[in-house]
Image (cartoon, rainbow, N blue to C red):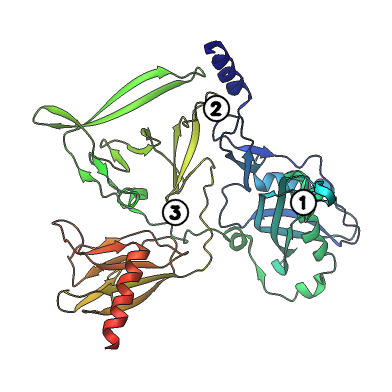
Amino acid sequence: MKQLLSTGLLLLSLTAPAHAQIEYLTLDKQELDLPARSFYVEQVLDGRIDRAGVGQTQEEALFGLANSTQPLDLSPNLVTSLTKFVQAQLPTRPGDQPVLLLIKELRVAEQAVSATAGPAGTTLTPAGTARQARATVALYLHTAAGYHFVKTTTDTLRPRSLYGAAYGHERNIANVLQRCLAQFSAADLLAARRQPAQPLAVLAGIGRLAPAGGLGYAILSPATSLVPGYYPSFLAFRNNQPVPVPTLQVNRKDHTSQTGDSLREIFPQLIVNGKARALPECWGFSDGQRTYVRYQGQYAALARQGDAFAFVATPKGSLWASAPKPTVHTLDLVSGRITLFADAGRPNPHTDTARIYVYCPLGADPAQTVFLNDKPVGELGENQVLKLAWADPVHEPRLRLGLAPALELAFMPNFRQPVYVRPARKPAPGKPPLELVAPKAAEFDLKAIRLRTRQ
């Protein structure tokens, strides 16, 4: 029995994919056919807001284990892959006009398809996985004056049967691009010349959330100095506001992984009365020279890469996965997301405005002025609700009661659901007098306020 178990574990380690590695798609074997076009693609730009790959695939489970997901991207990246593909498939012909393709969206997805029962208990179509693709592409005509907008097209490839769903992601990407580009064939390029021309720099900035002056985060400032301490949250790191710990020490242990890679484990400690103690549960820390992030129970050193930070970590796989290799991860400073993609991107919100409700239940202090990022937005008294809007996805809202230097409540904006804030029920020294409230609890509070104010 023991020998059988060992054999099974070995088989799983050999057949299971490496944990959390990117699977790259190539379009080399795909085709485009646009005989009616009057243009050739001179350049491709990535205008997506979320540039963290093109989707993910489900890894098949073994022996009843749960499926795992694996991120997908084009090889070596979207711009290089699509430029090579469309230029090879749509070569320049006499009379063709140069255009620029701006990719605003390119995603693939997978969806389980149930088996369809036929007559007398037979199976008409078997169960399987339907692969889908979606693209949004904008076309710009290039002239000596600049780039003139022509048209934007969107298409979704959603097979309705398992027969069509069996195509690979590469073929679906090529097909959905074919359908988008076909809509450009009838576009009036002469009329586009009358549209205002834009410089290339403007188009290259589409999808980028950073303002022209940079992101403006304290951790990116050349004047920022690091002090020994720990970051209780991602925002504390981004704003370079650690809890100071002058006695912080860092121990390091070098060893070799199962794949032969050299690894260094990091153990930060506090020295209190001559005794070493572990750091409190935190997002990361600084030793005064470098910054570190806690990821999957281990600390990794951060290295700045443009307006983001990168670190090397060994993903923790399950018992069934093959030995994972140390992998570069990216920390995106806008969203706080950690991904395997060099351009981590930002989540694309369903709306462009976050809704913030600041309310005051019974037993609160006298009415006070509420400030949103140092600007007064209203008075908050008992049984009152302030409805605020936040449209800046790059920076965090900061709320406070009363004039500075009152402590502020800072949080990441949520564009997908309302954010609720109320005066803290148990104010603590050194903590903001406002607190975030879970949606269910807040909805209960707001319902009670509505009932009281109707009386």
User: Which quarter of the picture shows residue 444?
Assistant: bottom left
Residue 16 visible at all: yes
User: Which quarter of the picture shows residue 451?
Assistant: bottom left
Q: Which residue is mark 3?
A: 335
In the structure shown, which secondary structural element does the residue marked by tag 2 occupy? loop
Q: Name the N-terminal-most of marks 3 and 1.
A: 1
Q: Name the N-terminal-most of marks 1 and 2.
A: 1
Mark nearer the viewer, 3 or 1? 1
Cα distance in 3D space between marks 2 and 3: 29 Å
Amino acid type assigned to the residue bearing label 2 in the image = Ala
Residue 98 visible at all: no
Q: Residue at x 49, y 28 (%)?
A: 326
Q: Which residue is mark 2?
A: 321
Picture coordinates of residue 129, whole percent (x, y): 71, 45
429, 343: nearer the viewer: 429
Crowd tier of the residue under label 2, counting other residues whose Cα lies within 10 Å: few below 14, some 14–19, many 20 or above: some
Q: Residue at x 44, y 54 (%)?
A: 334
User: Which quarter of the picture shows residue 271?
Assistant: top left
Q: Name the N-terminal-most of marks 2 and 3.
A: 2
Which quadrant is the N terminus positioned in? top right
Cα distance in 3D space between marks 3 and 1: 42 Å
57, 390: nearer the viewer: 57
Picture coordinates of residue 46, whole percent (x, y): 63, 54
Amino acid type assigned to the residue bearing label 1 in the image = Thr
Q: Which residue is mark 1?
A: 116
Contact? badges 3 and 1 (CB < 8 Å)? no
Is the residue 416 above or below the residue 22 in the image? below
